Image (tube, grey):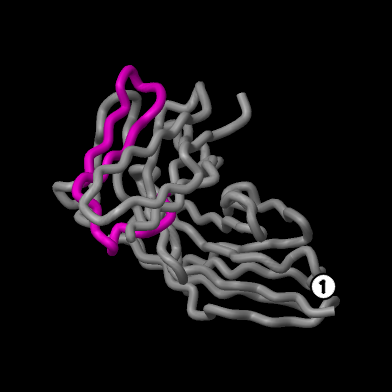
Amino acid sequence: AQRVTQPEKLLSVFKGAPVELKCNYSYSGSPELFWYVQYSRQRLQLLLRHISRESIKGFTADLNKGETSFHLKKPFAQEEDSAMYYCALSGSDYKLSFGAGTTVTVRA
Amino acid sequence: DTGVSQNPRHKITKRGQNVTFRCDPISEHNRLYWYRQTLGQGPEFLTYFQNEAQLEKSRLLSDRFSAERPKGSFSTLEIQRTEQGDSAMYLCASSLRDGTGYGYTFGSGTRLTVV
């Protein structure tokens, strides 16, 4: 069975402050991990994926297999980062399992 | 191709009625997924297709739910004898099967309200 846990429902930070969204997973094989984002009144969209090791909109995420974590980080939050963020895991069948999501609010 | 399209965007129905939703995936994507999302929760997997074959159905999908993908193109999700607990956002997504890790492309969803 595969499971994704996002322990924080809500996260509020000031503009310019660092932000970290936690994600832990359980999966017996080698998963692919993703972060999806949903801005207000927009569809769910892919933010980044662990295999690409890229930085998107200043966000990075590192897969830590020892801790089974895939935390999302950004050193300086911007107001436009306010959104709902979902961590997701894909197993060998390429089916995505999502966490419950974290609502991020960036205050001026 | 403008991405994944879902219709209708909103549906209000009376309890006991049947409803049908449609999803048009990205044309070159051979996998199509249906998810359900309720307030405060992440999307929950319902079912998926590879081309026209329905490969898996979640235990969440009761006998009142049926999905089809004729000819491996668009898909429909039908809910018979709707209940208030069916009220949710129904999301469709599509992807390539080859597992390149590009993830899914989601539609805007159909919001169902059962009154």
Q: Residue furthest top?
A: B71
Residue that numbered label 1 is attached to: A76
| Residue type for callout 1 | Phe
Residue A67, how many percent across, how many down? Answer: 47, 74
Which residue lies at the image location 24% right of the left edge and 58% below the top edge?
B83
Q: Is residue B67 magenta?
A: yes
Residue B3, how many percent across, how many down? Answer: 58, 32
* Helix, strand or loop status at disc 1: loop
B39, B33: nearer the viewer: B39
State whether residue A66 appears in this view: no
Circle count: 1
A101, A17: nearer the viewer: A101
Is B26 positioned to the left or the right of B61 in the image?
A: right
Image: magenta residue range: B65-90
Where A68 falls versus B99 (above or below)?
A: below
Is B7 positioned to the left or the right of A53 in the image?
A: left
Which residue lies at the image location 25% right of the left edge and 56% below the top edge?
B15
Q: Is residue B112 magenta?
A: no
Where A64 falls versus A20 (above or below)?
A: above
Q: Quarter of the image for the C terminus of chain B: give it.
A: bottom left
Question: Residue under mark 1: which chain is it in?
Answer: A
Which residue lies at the image location 78% right of the left edge and 64% below the top edge?
A80
Residue A4, how many percent across, how many down? Answer: 42, 66
A105, A88: nearer the viewer: A105
Which residue lies at the image location 51% right of the left edge and 68% below the top edge?
A101
Q: Quarter of the image for the N terminus of chain B: give it.
A: top right
Where B103 falls versus A47 (above or below)?
A: above
Residue A79: which quarter of the image?
A: bottom right
State whether residue A53 appears in this view: yes
Residue B99, how many percent across, how many down? Answer: 46, 37
Is A75 positioned to the left or the right of B31 in the image?
A: right
